[in-house]
Amino acid sequence: MSDPRTQPADLTKWVVTLPPTAFLLVFFLTPALIVVAASFGEPGEFGGLAPWPAHSLDAYRFLFGDIIYLEIFARSFLVAVLTTLICIVLAYPLAWLIARSPARRRDLLVLLVMLPFASNFLVRIYAWIMLLGPANLLYTPFAVIAGMVYVHLPFMILPLYANLEKHDPALLEAAQDLGANAWTRFWRVTFPLSLPGVFAGSALVFIPVLGMFAVPELLGGTGDILIGNLIKEQFLENRDWPLGSALAIMLTGAVLGLAGCAAWAARKGLHGTEAIT
Amino acid sequence: MVLLELKNITRRFGDLVAVQDVTLSIESGEFFTLLGPSGCGKTTILRMVAGFDAPDEGDILLDGRSLAGVPPEKRPLHTVFQSYALFPHMTVAGNVAFPLEMAGCSRDETRRRVNETLALVHLTDKAGQFPHELSGGQKQRVALARGLVNQPRLLLLDESLGALDAKLREEMQIELIALQREVGITFIFVTHAQDEALALSHRIAVMRAGRIEQCDEPDKLYTSPANRFVADFVGKINLLEVEVTASSKVLLKLKAAGLGEIAATDPRPISVGERGAFALRPELIRVFDHRESADLKNRFEGRVKELLYLGDVTLYKVELANGFIIEALMPNAASGRAKFYEVGDPVAVCWRQDAGVYLRN
C-alpha cells in the first residue's frame, strides 16, 4: 500500500486518467442511462416524454409485437455484414499494396486514403446521387450497399495497413523456402497474421453501418429502411421517444452480444489450434 | 560426389559488384562455410542458392542440373534464417510440420517426423509452445528442426548462431556438428566469425569484396594462408614487411627493415629482391629472458609493451628494435615456464624456422 516506489506512479495514473474518465461518465454513461430510462417512459403529448411518474413497457410490447421490427433488424445486420465483407475484400489488396510500397510513397498513399474526410460527408453522398441517378441505380439496395462501402472503406484500410506494414518479410521468404507457393503463403502466413487488423477494421465498419441512417435515407428506396432510420424517425417524426429509445437499446444490446460472441469464439479458436498442433 | 556447383557466378547491384566470378563445388555431406566480413557477398551467394536472388552471369547446378528459373519453393533445399523467421502464429510443432505439409505428407507421417526431429534437437517438451515463449537457443533449434525435418539435399544457414551469447553459441556449435554428422545433410554455413568457421567446417571459403580469396580446410587455412587478407582475417597473426634476400630450394632468407635477417622455409621458387609479408602466428613465438640463448636464429630482443593475462594464456605485445610490435601467446601452464614478464621488461622473442609463412604481395 505505502510502497514509496509505486506511490508517485499511482498518483500520476490517477491524474492522467481522471479527466477522460469524468468526461465519459458525464457525456457517455449519463445519456446512455437516460436512454434506458426513456425506453420505460411514456411519450409526451407534444413529443418528448410524459412527466416522471408515468412509465410503461409499451415500447417493448410494441417492438416485439410486430414482425416488421425484426425484419428491419435482420436487414440492417445483413447490410452491415455485406458491407463489412465487401470492405475486407476491397481494402485488403489496397492495404497490402500500400504496406509493400517504398516507405516514402506509403505516407502519400495513406493520405490519399484519408483525403475523402476532407470534404463533407453529405456532399459526398450527394455526389453519389448524381453518379447513380443516370445509371438508374438510385434508391435500390445496391445504392445503399455501395454508399455504405464507400463511406466506411477507409476505416477498413487503415487498421489493415497498420497491421500488414508490421509483417516481417522474412516470414514469407521462410514459407517460400519451405515449399509454400504464393497462394499458400497468403493463406498460411499473411492472412492469419493479419486477423487482428481484419477484426479491428470489421468492428470499425460493422458497428457504424448498423446505426447509419443518412446513406439509406439519401440513396435507398422506401424498402431499404434500416434500424438507424427507424430510430431517427421515432425521435424526429413520430415523436415516440420511448419506442426510439427501446430500439436503440435493442441495437446496442445486439452489438454487445455479438462482440461477446466474437471474443468468445476467438479465444476458443485459439485454443482449438493449440489442441491440433 | 559433387552436390552443388557454382560456375563463374557474378551478381551486380547497380555499380556494386556483390559477387564476382565465383566458382565453387561443394561435396555431398560436407559442412561448408562461407566466411568473410559483412558486405563481402557471402549472403548474396546464399540467397542465389536458395533462389531469392539470381546471378547475372554464371550458373548454379544442384546434382548436375541447373537451378536457373527454379523458384525457391521448388528447390530441394532449406534455409535457416538469421532472424530464424519462425511463424509466430504456429506452435513449435506447427512450425516444424510446415515443410512436411507443403510436401503433402500424410497426417501420421507428419506427426511421426515432427516428433523425431524435435527429439533430435531436444525440444520434445516444447512442441506445444509458441515461438515467443522460447529462449534464443530454443528458437534457433526450432529453426534448425524446421529446416531439417523433410531431409533436404542441402541446408543453408545464414549467420545462424550470430544472435546467441558466447556460451550458448559454443553449445550450439557442438550440437550443430553432431547434428550434421547424424543427419548427413550437406550444410552451407555463412558467417563473419572466423573462430566459428574454424570450429564447424570441413572446408571454408574466405571471401572479400565479392571474390573468394582462399578455399581450404580449416587447418590449411590457418597454417598456410594464401595472402595477407586471409592471414589477417582468420585468427590472430603478426605481419612483418620483408624483402627476400636469398632463396634456395626450401630455405628463404628475409630482411625486415631495422630488424635484421629472418630465416624461413618456402618450397616455391621465389626471386631475390621480391617484397612481401612474413606472417607469424602468436602462439608459435616464444618469449624468454633477454640474456638467454643469444646464438639462436630468428631471435630478436625487445621490451614488453603490454600484456594481457587471459587465464590459460598470456598475450605479450613486445616492441622490437625497429618499433614493430609483435604479439606472442604463451601458455601459462607450460612446463619450464620460469616467470611472468612485466610491462617494460627486456625480453627476447624467437621462433622456429618453419613457423612463419612468406606471403607475396
Image (cartoon, grey):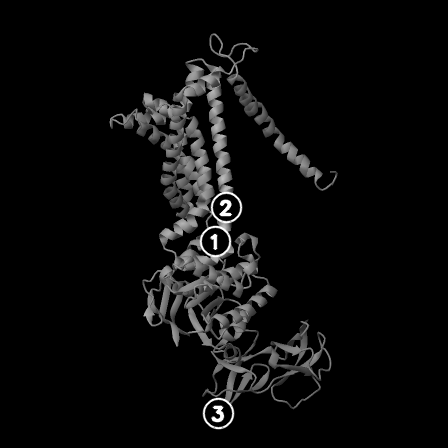
Give B323 or B199, whichever is nearer the viewer. Answer: B199
First in sequence: mark 3 vs mark 1: 1
Label 2: few (<14), some or many (≥20) within 10 Å? few
Residue A71, relative to residue A174: is it above or below? above
Q: Is residue B349 left or right of residue A162?
A: right
What residue did someone put label 1 on?
Answer: B87
User: Residue B157, position in %: x, y?
Assistant: 47, 65
Q: CA distance from mark 3 to mark 2?
A: 76 Å
What amino acid is found at the position of numbered circle 3 in the picture?
Answer: Lys
Q: Chain of mark 3?
A: B
In the picture of the structure, the residue carrying the numbered disc 3 is B249
Q: In the drawing, what numbered circle is on residue A270?
A: 2
Contact check, label 3 and label 1, Cβ < 8 Å: no
Is the same chain shared between marks 3 and 1?
yes
Residue contact at pointers 1 and 2, CB within 8 angstroms: no
The Cα–Cα distance between marks 3 and 1, rounded to whole angstroms, is 61 Å
Residue B305 rendering spot, x and y as whole percentages? 67, 74
Vertical position of residue A26 compared to residue B328: above or below:
above
Residue at figure coordinates x 51%, y 35% from the top left: A260
Residue depicted at x 33% and y 72%: B64
Residue sitting farthest toward the bottom:
B249
For marks 1 and 2, give the one nearer the viewer: 2
**Seen from this angle, which residue lies furthest top?**
A45
Q: Amino acid at mark 1?
A: Phe
Looking at the image, how many numbered discs can be counted on the residues?
3
